Amino acid sequence: MSLKGKTALVTGSTSGIGLGIALELARAGADLVLNGFGDAQPALAAVRAEGVQAVHHDADLRRPGEIAAMMEMAVAVYGAVDIVVNNAGIQHVAALEDFAPQSWDDVIAVNLSSAFHTMRLALPGMRARGWGRIVNVASVHGLVASANKSAYVAAKHGVVGLTKVTALETAATAITCNAICPGWVLTPLVQRQIDQLAEREGLSAAQASERLLGEKQPSRRFVTPEQLGKLALFLCSDAADEVRGAAWNMDGGWVSQ
Ligand code: NAD
């Protein structure tokens, strides 16, 4: 399939799953707007190596004004945003009564509210052009819960609900909105949880990694950013024209239990 001539904006694409998705969209020919913290040069170089254009915007997704500036820049550079992938996410692990209110606000802002803002800003252009794709990276935690992840689970369930509403509001158009629900993927976000587990329990990194997978993911293998990128690419294809409001798990069997 070809996405040549299309522009895709992927939030949180300087590392991990977002970069994996950006690379698959680039391989299909889409020009990219990358976003995220840290040094964006390696991600920009990797995407450009696929023969497409790529720019980076460093919007802090906790701030609606910066999200608006990012969307404006995308239109100024490419003329349109055809594909939005709301991928950026952060995690904070603590029991509810110990959960810092600022951490709650940050997790909800990045993982949930930023998707509301990018979608509300991208939809008018998609409607005007008569085509669009929105892929929201939720999580298995959009479908089931785990202890000590109140804000994350609430935000991801919110993303799944927001995805369904958006799918209904665009159902009569060629714009689709779907969510992807990954299980464990070995990215910096999960590496931090492995490191904390190893330190807490006195385990080696390999033992902590096995423990993490063993508790939740029956395959005992990590899902990869490449696999998730290919699922996002499918959702952007014509074959997925009538996939609307799905919450598609790719989780090594996690939510089948
Ligand atoms: P990651 O930490 O590798 O990447 C997160 C990205 O978001 C980075 O580019 C980071 O700079 C960016 N980001 C964080 N806060 C931001 C902010 N305020 N403004 C702008 N960008 C910000 O994490 P990942 O594992 O690749 O996670 C990507 C998405 O996948 C998240 O939504 C996460 O919840 C979801 N997810 C991850 C897993 C997993 O096992 N890794 C599982 C299910 C869902």
Image (spheres, rainbow, N blue to C red):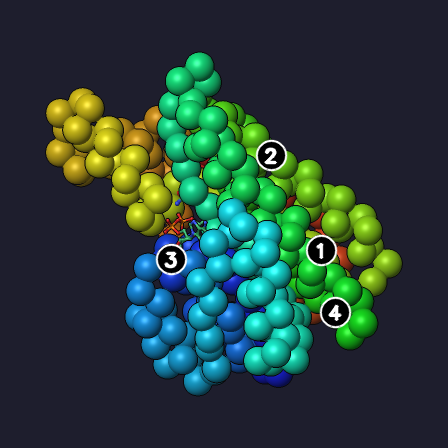
Front residue of 235/104: it is 104
| Residue 112 left/right relative to 239 | left
Front residue of 239/164: it is 164
Quadrant in which the N terminus appears: bottom right
Location of residue 95 by image quarter: top left
Which circle's residue, 3 or 2, is located before the other in the chain? 3
Q: Foreground mark, 2 or 4?
A: 4
Q: Is residue 137 above or below residue 70?
A: above
Instruction: Return the residue at label 4.
Output: 125
Label annotation for residue 120: 1
User: Disc 4, ligand 1: is the CB inside 8 Å?
Assistant: no
Identify the residue at horizontal 74%, vertical 69% (top origin). 125
Label annotation for residue 37: 3
Q: Name the secondary structure under disc 4.
A: helix
- Marks 4 and 3 in Cβ contact (< 8 Å): no
* Real-space Cα separation, disc 1 to disc 4, in angstroms: 10 Å
* Real-space Cα separation, disc 4 to disc 3, in angstroms: 27 Å
Q: Is residue 225 in view from this perspective?
A: no
Instruction: Return the residue at label 2.
Output: 157
Q: Amino acid at mark 3?
A: Phe
Identify the residue at horizontal 47%, vertical 54% (top origin). 60
Q: Name the secondary structure under disc 1.
A: helix
Q: Position of residue 32 (x, y in %)?
A: 51, 73
Which circle's residue, 1 or 2, is located before the other in the chain? 1
Location of residue 157 by image quarter: top right
Other-residue count near label 3 (Cα within 10 Å), few / some / many at <14 / 14–19 / ≥20: few
* Real-space Cα separation, disc 1 to disc 3, in angstroms: 23 Å
User: Disc 3, ligand 1: is the CB inside 8 Å?
Assistant: yes
Q: Is residue 126 above or below residue 221?
A: below
